[in-house]
Image (tube, rainbow, N blue to C red):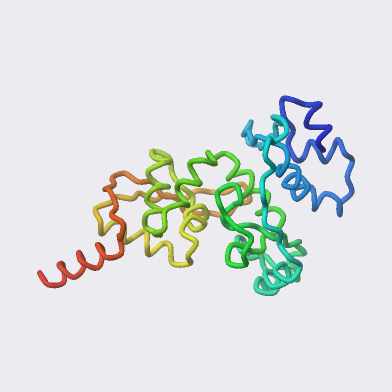
Amino acid sequence: MLELLIAHPQGLSITQMRQLLDLGGEEQQHLDRRMRDLDEEHEIERVRSKGATLYVYKGSRAVPKKRDPITQKVRGQVLLRANGACAMCGRTIAKHGITLQIDHIIPVEWGGNSEIGNLQALCEEDNAAKKAYFAGFDQELMKKVFAFPKIHQRIGQLLVALQPGYVESFLLGAVAAQEDWQKRLRELRTLGWEIEVRKMKQPNGRVTSAYKAAKWTELSDDPSADIRRIEKERGTKR
């Protein structure tokens, strides 16, 4: 893989590398993992081109990246928790014949760790789609977003950073790292935010929601306290 990337400075997609390496089905399943292994010691830039993600070799890293290993025990716990179903599309091994892969909800490149709370099981299709989608974002920007300790802050900062574009629901869910992130999104409106929503059809036919900040205010260090105060004041006035 490394030799291929060096020999093709314009970049290669995962599909192109599979074809050039003439891999079998079992070997193909682990190609993404091998790419992540290379990324620890080599700088490999992700570039979006005509709907595909190209991997462009930039050179060896002066200081190798550190990635916490996922133990076999933790892998087993994540797969057991998944109960055979993909966390994104809901398809199952038994009914649809999918293969599940372990995914970092918050990518390592964005500051995510390998603890069980940041891991989920995704089918190969959704795992590849998520990586391709996330590859188009500025890693330093996303690190700053994830550095905020409060959920409202992370969601708000992401909406503002990507404004005037729309932010898809699964990215907001990853940033929030909480199942009821939609409630937190609604609470931003209590703080004076105007958030537009629209439906987006994915390549696989699924329809998801996407959100855009049309108006926003500066958030304090404790948005939840501000929301409780405002709701209490509104209740008193009624």
Instruction: Tell me the quadrant of the picture where the N terminus can be found.
Output: top right
Quadrant hosting residue 225: bottom left
Viewer-nearest residue: 62 or 179: 62
Quadrant hosting residue 161: top left
Q: Is residue 92 above or below residue 126?
A: below
Instruction: Tell me the quadrant of the picture where the C terminus can be found.
Output: bottom left
Viewer-nearest residue: 90 or 46: 46
Q: Residue at x 79, y 36 (%)?
A: 16
Q: Is residue 70 left or right of residue 130?
A: right
Q: Residue at x 63, y 65 (%)?
A: 90
| Residue 215 position within the rendered picture, expressed as x and y whole percent measured from the top left | 28, 45
| Residue 32 position within the rendered picture, expressed as x and y whole percent measured from the top left | 74, 48
Q: Is residue 237 above or below residue 125?
A: below
| Residue 110 position within the rendered picture, expressed as x and y whole percent measured from the top left | 55, 48
Q: Residue at x 43, y 40 (%)?
A: 165
Q: Residue at x 28, y 51 (%)?
A: 193
Outermost residue on the left side: it is 237
How many marks overall? 0
Q: Is residue 111 above or below residue 227?
A: above
Q: Is residue 57 left or right of residue 150?
A: right
Q: Is residue 54 left or right of residue 194?
A: right
| Residue 199 position within the rendered picture, expressed as x and y whole percent measured from the top left | 46, 51
